[in-house]
Amino acid sequence: MKKGIDVSENNGVVDWQAVADAGVEFVMVRSSYGKSGVDGNFAANVAGAHEAGLKVGAYHYSYALTVEDARIEAAHCRQVIDNSGVGLELPIFFDMEDADHWKENHGFVFDLTLITDICHAFIDNIGLNCGVYASLDWLENYIDWRGLGCSVWNAQWGENDDIRGYMWQYTDSLEIDGKCFDANVLYE
């Protein structure tokens, strides 16, 4: 098992050496969101993590309401990664949840088949090693993760990991250098 964190521009400037000194071995960095959003710190976070000796993967937060939206988001995410000029050692993960209620507020139907099809469309069209990120509730009720046949990054804060996938996000309160991060375990 390897210890890791995930970050986005919402974390501000990260002291990557302090992260490495805390025993962190990898980081998942948000690359993009929706059909056109780019995380403003993506390239800098990847470069800083690499300089500190960390392995890096990425994630894309989705606003897809349809399979076609997911295909467009996959092309966008791939373009952001390609244009950044940074290399990634770990997969890209697709986050289909609705943490900000955008999908709910736009009439999205939370149907297992539709959501799984949207995940499939993104994964099948990005052209990179790709998996799905979701909370335990989403993995049990909204995504047929077994049917996707990809890596799973399970977000379940607490004592155990009921769906042991590729990676487990176990807390949102790992403090390093005065900042709080989501903490993850990578199973190998």
Image (tube, helix red, strand yellow):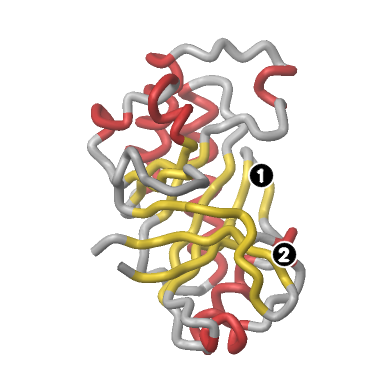
Position of 182 with respect to 82 (left or right) is: right
At which x and y percent is residue 78? 47, 53
Residue 165 — which label? none
- Where is residue 39? Give x, y as percent: 67, 58
Q: Which residue matches tag 2? A: 11
Q: Amino acid at mark 2?
A: Asn
Residue at 52 percent across and 55 percent down: it is 79
Total residue callouts? 2
- Look at label 1 and name its amino acid: Ser
Residue at the (44%, 21%) spot, across then down: 142
Element type where label 2 sits in the image: helix
Q: Residue 102 at x, y = what percent?
A: 71, 26
Q: Residue furthest front?
A: 159
Q: Residues within 10 Å of mark 1 (few under 14, many from 20)?
A: few
Using the image, determine if residue 181 lies above or below residue 20: above
Does residue 157 sit above or below 7 in this rendering?
Answer: above
Instruction: Count residues near mark 2 (Cα–Cα under 10 Å), then give few for <14, some for 14-19, many for 20+.
Output: few
Q: Pick the residue in front: 18 or 124.
A: 18
Q: Quadrant of residue 140?
A: top left
Which is nearer the N-term, disc 2 or disc 1? 2
Residue 179 lies left or right of residue 117; in this view the side is right
Q: CA distance from mark 2 to mark 1?
A: 21 Å
Q: Which mark is residue 36?
A: 1
